[in-house]
Image: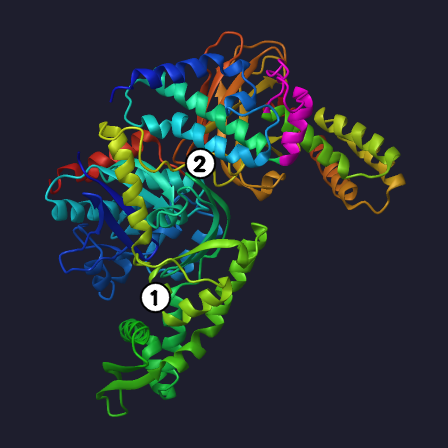
Amino acid sequence: MEVDLRRRVEVETVHSLLEDMDYYRLLRLKPGAPVMEVERAFSDQSQTFHPDRFYGVRDPKFTRMVTAVFKKVSEAYQVLKDPELKRMYDKKLGVVPGSDSASDVRSVNKAALEKERDRSELDDAVTDKRARKYYELALIARNNEDWNGVVMNIQFALNYEPENDNLKTELKRARGYMNEKKKKNQNPYKIKIV
Amino acid sequence: MPYAIGIDLGTSNSVVSVIRDGTAYVIPDEEGNRTHPSVVSFGHGQNAIVGNQALRQMVFNPQGSVYSSKRLIGRGIDSEEVVRARHSVPYEIVAGEHSDPRIRVHDRVHTLQEIGAHILRYLKGLAEAYLDEPVQHAVITVPAYFNDNQRQATRDAGQIAGLEVLRIINEPTAAALAYGLGQAKNEFVSVYDLGGGTFDISVLHIMGDVFEVVSTAGDTYLGGDDFDHVLMEFLLAQLNEEQQRQVRRSPSSRLKLKRAAEQAKKDLSRDEEATIHVDALVRDERGFEQPFDSSLTRIQYNQIVFPLVKRTFEVCDEALTAAKREPGDIGALVLVGGMTRSPIIQEAVENYFGRVPELGVNPDEVVSVGAAIQADTLMSSLTGGTAGSGTLLIDVTPQSLGVGTVGGFVERLIERNSAIPTGTEKVFTTSVDAQTEVKIEVYQGESRMAGDNEKLGEFILEGLRPAPRGDVKITVYFDIDGDGIVSVTAEEGETGLAASIRLEASTGLTSEEVEDLRTELDFDNVGF
């Protein structure tokens, strides 16, 4: 199947601008547009950019381009339809309704927003301010696989919130890993995630 | 344009449909049956019989007749479902080389993909006979909760059967598609699917062309068979103790009584009363064969099966709670499965949801018709006929995808309900000096704890350049294609070299194995 020239140009243009477009531009919405407009916009853009619209095209390079564009359109939709992610995104973009959106869109993406949200979820696990401080240290230790550090800091946090079940579970788990680590020597398969 | 068929590959029964000149046709077998039992019966010469004929063979050849194979496909040998089946099915289940269950019949071991292929090949043959031309393309449906392994295994079964699988789609999505739901509307749809052996309820959110499976719940051991079973027990209780023992001891008598119960159930969806007659069911004290005669009213029947009906609504409650919806939020109700033709079910479902279900498509056939519609749309695009038009179906990932991190956690990479195709990338780095391999465990599921998710497999990145720890950075790309199937590729950051990836601990067949089976079974040279 041959792709109609107009549609080919459309896909190629959006693909070349993909990295520089914020989620609103990608969905052809005004910056800060309300959630209710997002669904409609996603549906419209999918009509143009869903790979099934080019199912029979035997041009791998073009197919890759369409798929990349759709993935990004879908990512934009995932963020903008979720009120919390959208609020965070709008704040990062510095969106004021009616104005143009900020230019630094590369560092503000779905993965970064989710990480931040998950992080605040973790923070919600502890309410006391001093306990949270120690819990944060425990999380850092956990990332470094320093189980002694995790156990120690959670124990400190528990001093301030002795009834916190989250902390108790984490403590039990960390003790488990600490013992496991003692047993095993160096595990060649440890992965650290950047 | 060549025809493309839609296949509902069911646990108990399968259905195949095709769109011809804009109309959906459900394809019958030579006896006129429109549903085909998902039974494969192997003779001693290993020739396979499928469908209604195979169902009849079951009485004479229980060890050689494979049924309910959909419960096993794509699962691990140690999974709960497989362990359960090992205790309850007459055919023999053995462990395969990928820790997958396989079925041994008369000394030949069959993968589940082959069993599926026999059924698919049979359906393909029916379509070819009906259309009088070769058929190569198909859309196959799977339950919404099917994970990557199960979807991949289903697609492989299609390939072994000599089909080009255009797309794997979710059963509830297909059902909604058959009724043309969505379109310009934005609504929640419930799909109530009571089949032969399983019950599923799904809540879909349809926005135009986007079909989101918001929640799905089910009972994999609740279906028409259970209705037959309680009815059979009710009939059995009418015999004296000695005769009950006779029936329980004889598989063929049990089957005869079960068939009679099934027939009574069907009669009662039309009539107020059913008469039951079974020839030579038991022997009297002198050893003479005696028939069994009884009758049953619809009111009696309703009382007998009420606990089962009630159970389906407990599962509906679960699904609605998970979707954060009330029955009143549901804009359309779709019934799937032969059991939903029964008046007691229809009434109860209408009561529960407070609305009349969509009507017009046979509930046995609705999933297959939806699959045929999608097959037709994709085929049009494929052949350039009406490229870029028709219903666009945007499906979503059934479960979140993540990788295992230290300490038994899962880092989520692709969230559940992301529109597919989708993908993401992740940078991994070595943590030990001169490390040449990195192991990545891939999980599907919603828990943050690795152990609570389904492990899809382990990928081992090998042949990394020996360097101080942290120096080697590998970008791993996780992609989910339009069928919901996951693929993983990797690239070393600096050199741009593709790192080689070895998949382990997955129950799937390799592409070579699939190709070998396809050649071995030589389905391509059967029929057309």
Q: Residues within 10 Å of mark 1 (few under 14, many from 20)?
A: some
Q: Percent position (x, y) of residue B269?
A: 32, 73
Q: Could you say whether the residue bearing mark 1 is in a helix, strand or loop?
A: helix
Label 1: chain? B
The residue marked by circle 2 belongs to what chain? B
Name the side, left or right, on which B210 lies relative to A119. Answer: left
Q: Quadrant of the C terminus of chain A?
A: top right
Task: Identify the magenta region.
Answer: A83-109
Which quarter of the figure has residue A20? top right
Residue A89 sits inside the magenta stretch? yes
Instruction: Please tell me the numbered disc located at residue B341.
Output: 1
Amino acid type for the residue under numbered disc 1: Arg
Residue type of the residue flagged with mark 2: Ser
Q: Which label sits in the foreground, 2 or 1?
A: 1
Q: Quadrant of the N terminus of chain A?
A: top left
Query: Crowding near pointer 2: few (<14 within 10 Å), some, many (20+)?
Result: some
Q: Which residue is mark 2?
A: B506
As drawn, B412 above or below B115: above
Count of numbered labels shown in the rendering: 2
Q: Residue at x 69, y 24 (%)?
A: A91
Which one is nearer the viewer's eye here, B35 or A43?
A: A43
Q: Is residue B248 magenta?
A: no
Residues under labels 2 and 1: Cα distance?
A: 40 Å
> Mark number for residue B15?
none
